[in-house]
Image (cartoon, rainbow, N blue to C red):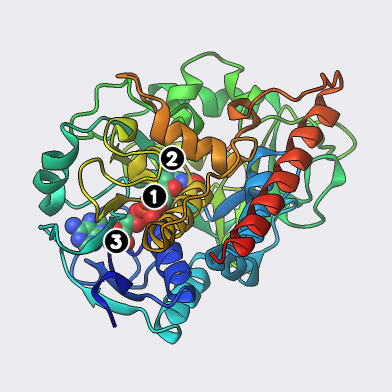
Amino acid sequence: MSKNREVYIIGGGLAGSECALKLVEYGYHVKLLDMKPIKKSPAHHADTLCELVCSNSLKSEELSTGSGTLKRELDILSSSVLRIARSCAVPAGSALAVDRDAFSRAVTQELIDKGVEIIPKIVSEIEDDKTTVIATGPLSDEALDQEIERITGKRPYFFDAAAPIVSGDSIDMEHAFFGGRYGKGGDDYLNLPMDKEEYLAFWKELVSAECAEVKDFEGEEIFEGCMPIEVMAKRGEDTLRFGPLRPVGFTHKGKRPYAVLQLRREDEEGKLFNLVGFQTHLKFPEQKRVFSLIPGLKNAEFMRYGVMHRNTYINLPKVVDKNLKVKGCDNLYFAGQITGVEGYMESVMSGLVTALKIVERDRGVYLDIPDTTITGALIKYVTEYDSEDYQPMNANFGILPELSDHVKDKKQRKLAYAERAVRDMTEYSERRKENGI
Ligand SMILES: Cc1cc2nc3c(=O)[nH]c(=O)nc-3n(C[C@H](O)[C@H](O)[C@H](O)COP(=O)(O)OP(=O)(O)OC[C@H]3O[C@@H](n4cnc5c(N)ncnc54)[C@H](O)[C@@H]3O)c2cc1C
């Protein structure tokens, strides 16, 4: 095996796993170094790789959404992690949610089966003479901090919270009903309706509940898409009813409830349920006390409490060229959430594109992914948005260039963005084949 056919990937999360599986498809020998099971970040629990640290949802499959379009693009690029996720799906309406343990085990098994060399190691140094991808994620271990900051300068950060999980048999089914919003999605979600009195009793306790102390947290650097429930609640009495507890599309006992908490299955049998949108950093006893005020959760058994963590990333546009290579260094790449993409599938995408860029480097053919695709637009963002105010970005239509013809209807407009993205990604994939890559 020649030297440039060997790649070291540090971090076997969503990005590192996808990157490894794509590179082996191209005949590379991949050494995947992960500190598991020697050490785990505060949000990782499993010994296996490619672990989902919070929600088990990989978001919508619907083409008319940014995340649905990204999935279609990843299908065109033959993402292994997405394929495996679908094989571990649990019912979740139009969203793709997975049994997190089965998913993590299946990806780890595929890495082994495909010949990826998995090396348990807490990495603290980067060797400049080896092609290396750093995919250590938002909770990258401090052992590597100095090395990363030597290359990237000081790193920005924000805070992100995870939602609690309760056991299915501790939910009082007298106060619960299955069903999706507007009758969609069959029995995929379990809903806990509240009347006005119940909602207000819960809300009042929530806004005055005690939060856990989080190192360096000053209350401002929260990612809007993952706002803790107690922070959102403090914005106003009704804010939650327009957010995670919105009752529209539900009828219970002949009328619309005042508020509804949705629970999503964590596994096929419904042994575990995730409190959708209830990411929190309340103290654990406070989570139990306050969330148990919701009818149906009175005797809930909390299998995992919500937690908040500091997510660190890199101001990537200052560090890499448009082919994701660290400027002035022929061998070094970053992938995943550490680059400033935000979300599970976005991290998978980043790992996949990094693999393609390594292949292009070695074959001497570079092909730009069209910025009319979510993938191309995200890669453009993380390589070109050169600003001190560089913020993490997830899949959405707002990052795409305008359509050539204005489409007035909002739904049709989203579909037009999606269809253009799928068409352009298909053409791009064909161009790769024509170029022998
Ligand atoms: C608390 C929290 C909640 C989140 N909730 C959501 C959510 O609900 N939905 C969503 O889409 N995204 C969520 N995210 C973002 C999520 O982390 C990313 O979307 C995704 O996991 C990032 O993938 P990654 O591959 O970049 O990193 P990760 O999946 O975190 O993988 C990084 C890997 O690197 C390893 N590692 C770290 N340091 C070292 C080292 N020095 N040496 C060796 N190995 C190392 C770790 O063990 C880990 O396996 C959340 C993040 C956090 C922190």
Q: Position of residue 17 (x, y in %)?
A: 41, 66
Q: What residue is rendered at 80% in x and 34% in y?
A: 416
Residue 23, horizontal then vertical, whole percent: 42, 69
Q: Residues within 10 Å of mark 3 (few under 14, many from 20)?
A: many
Residue at 40% in and 68% down: 20
Q: Badges 1 and 2: C-beta atoms under 8 Å apart?
A: yes
Give the vertical position of 274 relative to 34 (above or below). above
Residue under circle 2?
A: 341
Instruction: Specify the quadrant of the image occupied by residue 21.
Output: bottom left
Residue 290 as seen in the image, left or right of residue 398: left
Q: Is residue 304 visible?
A: no
On the image, numbered disc 3 is attached to which residue? 11
Q: Quadrant of the N terminus?
A: bottom left
Residue behind mark 1:
336
Q: How many marks?
A: 3
Q: Quadrant of residue 239?
A: top right
User: In the image, is the residue at mark 3 within 8 Å of ligand 1 by its beta carbon?
Assistant: yes
Alpha carbon of mark 1 to alpha carbon of mark 2: how far? 7 Å
Asked if the beta carbon under badge 1 is closer than 8 A to the nearest atom of ligand 1, the reply is yes
Q: Residue at x 24, y 22 (%)?
A: 218
Task: Check disc 1 and give the amino acid type.
Answer: Gly
Q: Secondary structure at mark 2?
A: loop
Mark 3 vs mark 2, CA separation in Å? 16 Å
Measure how far apart labels 1 and 3 are at the Cα level.
10 Å
Residue 97 against residue 422 in the figure, above or below: below
The reply to whether the residue tagged 2 has its Cβ within 8 angstroms of ligand 1 is: yes
Q: Which numbered disc flags the more N-terminal residue, 1 or 3?
A: 3
Nearer to us in this view, 425 or 282? 425
